[in-house]
Image (cartoon, grey):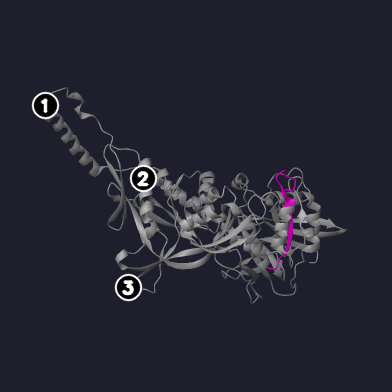
Amino acid sequence: MKNIRNFCIIAHIDHGKSTLADRLLDATGSVTSREKQDQLLDSMDLERERGITIKSHAIQMDYVYEGESYVLNLIDTPGHVDFSYEVSRSIAACEGALLVVDAAQSIQAQTISNLYLALENDLEIIPVLNKVDLPSANPEEVTDDIVDLLGCDADEVIPASAKTGIGIDEILAAIIKRIPAPKGNPEESLQALIFDSVYNPFRGVETYFRVLNGEIRKGQHIKFMATGRSYYADEVGTLRLKQQPKEVIKTGDVGYLITGIKEAKEVKVGDTITDAKNPTTNMIEGFEDVKPMVFAGIYPVDTEDYEELRASMEKLQLNDASLVFIPESSAALGFGFRCGFLGMLHLEIIQERLEREFDMTVITTVPNVSYHAYTNKEPDTIILVNNPSDLPEPSSLNRVEEPYIKATIITKSDYVGPVMSLCIEKRGEITNQTYLTTERVELSFDMPLAEIVFDFYDRLKTVSRGYASFDYSPIGMRTSQLVKVDVLLNGNGVDALSALLHKDNAYDIGKKMCEKLKELIPRQQFDIPIQAAIGAKIIARETVKALRKDVTAKCYGGDISRKRKLLEKQKKGKKRMRQVGNVEIPQEAFMAVLKLND
């Protein structure tokens, strides 16, 4: 056990985490020159294109240092705020972390939030200053920032370049010297932490775990404590580039387990594995069910593809257990699903994967969050509102509560004004402002989650010229003045475009929605009124003018009454057409609501 080191890499998006992992694999000889490729641990096309890690990976390396051989387990973590629970479980499975900071961009918000997670778990932090070979690098200043943040000595910060391989040997030496060996009792009953799971179409769900106490053997009868189900360990082994089956995985080590589970829901990240005959009494702390934060409807463009969409969503759920969906129907869009996501990036990824991996073209409705409504009849009973149409009638409504978050934004001091006005416009209340250095400021806000769902992140990047990083954590529900704004087309409500908005913003957003739809809805043979309404009260209206055929063209000269007769006849036809007319809404119209400020 004394020669095992378990560590993870924490960094902001694009600070060189995946490249550093590649160099560590090269340096320890874990990959042959044939298997080599950039971003080796990022196996999805999407991850490579966007340069982000979506699914965490784990890999085991052997390294000989001063004549002794060591086993290094790298547990990779996703970098984005949407996946912070997965990150917290990966961190709980380690004893140390490499804190990677870009020498050109300095410390960003996600670095700090993941660093706090690591410090809460008492991890040994090894600071690494990456990209020191860039012409725009500023190593002395960024080293000072790291020293201020961690309270370490400047000599402890390792200058490196994952691209060229500078400093890799020093990092490996630091992992062995500074990260403690795992503690644990091999004699106790089995206690192992699940930090990830992957779906294999041939073998079912592969569970990745770290053994804290005891050992796990092939063929052993084991039990998952959160779900209470028991299975037999058909195969256990270690995670090299390819899986290596073993007879036993001992205390302190990391491995995979195959039990033939077919449902990803049965394996929960953060759960404890124990022996079924001799179970451990205490679960590993920190387990929670992952809760979706953002909800949106996903509908097939062609209603006949509904069953195909269901099959695609189920396959996706096997790979990504945090995707939640239930069937729902809409008058405007037919049958589809109401889906819960961890955040906006998660929603984008799911939508993109549906299109790429399953060739499904889908319509996504306006994303919203989950509200709690209370009625006058039963003021203590919570009604969950995941869809604006679930909101009770205004006459019977007592109050509505919406989820709030604590948002942390780190930006340059030049952009404090624009960032503050953006957050205040989004109903944020500033709670704290600290200068990390003379140039960099950390701002904390309490704000409604619903305001972030729309276009907050894009606008934050715009007002700060890309120099702001953003991170958030939920802080509970608060009472709010919310109203349901409906959009009526030709007098008929379009349920997929209705939204729950704050009373003060309802008029502005309703007006903008009508203007945007006027641009996007194609003209018909009759006038189409577009209205925004709160209950029975119309708050905004635009009209898409009719295409007119010149019926008076054949009258050359003659009496005016002939022209009038033809125009009256046309008017009657238009009126009748409007009663039976059907307005087609293009896909852009649903997405346009998200980009009202463009």
Q: In this view, does 584 lie above or below 95?
A: above
- The residue that label 1 is drawn on is 559
Q: What element carries label 3?
A: loop
Whether residue 219 can be seen here: no
Magenta run includes residue 122: yes
**How far apart are the two marked residues, 3 and 1, measured between alpha carbons?**
68 Å
Identified by mark 3, the residue type is: Lys
Identified by mark 2, the residue type is: Glu
Label 3 or label 1, whichever comes before in sequence order: 3
Q: What element carries label 2?
A: helix
Q: From the viewer's perspective, is 133 left or right of 314?
A: right
State the image coordinates of residue 263 (x, y, percent, origin top left).
Answer: 55, 60
Label 2 or label 3, whichever comes before in sequence order: 3
Q: Is mark 1 on a helix, strand or loop?
A: loop
Q: Observer-nearest residue: 121 or 302?
A: 121
Identified by mark 1, the residue type is: Asp
- The residue that label 3 is drawn on is 377
**How many neighbours does mark 1 have within 10 angstroms: few (below 14), some (14-19), or many (20 or more)?**
few
Q: Observer-nearest residue: 253 or 183?
A: 183
State the image coordinates of residue 96 (x, y, percent, origin top left).
Answer: 72, 63
Tell me the number on the disc at residue 515: 2
**How many neighbours does mark 2 have within 10 angstroms: few (below 14), some (14-19), or many (20 or more)?**
some
> Which quadrant of the figure contains the C terminus?
top left
The image quarter containing residue 264 is bottom right
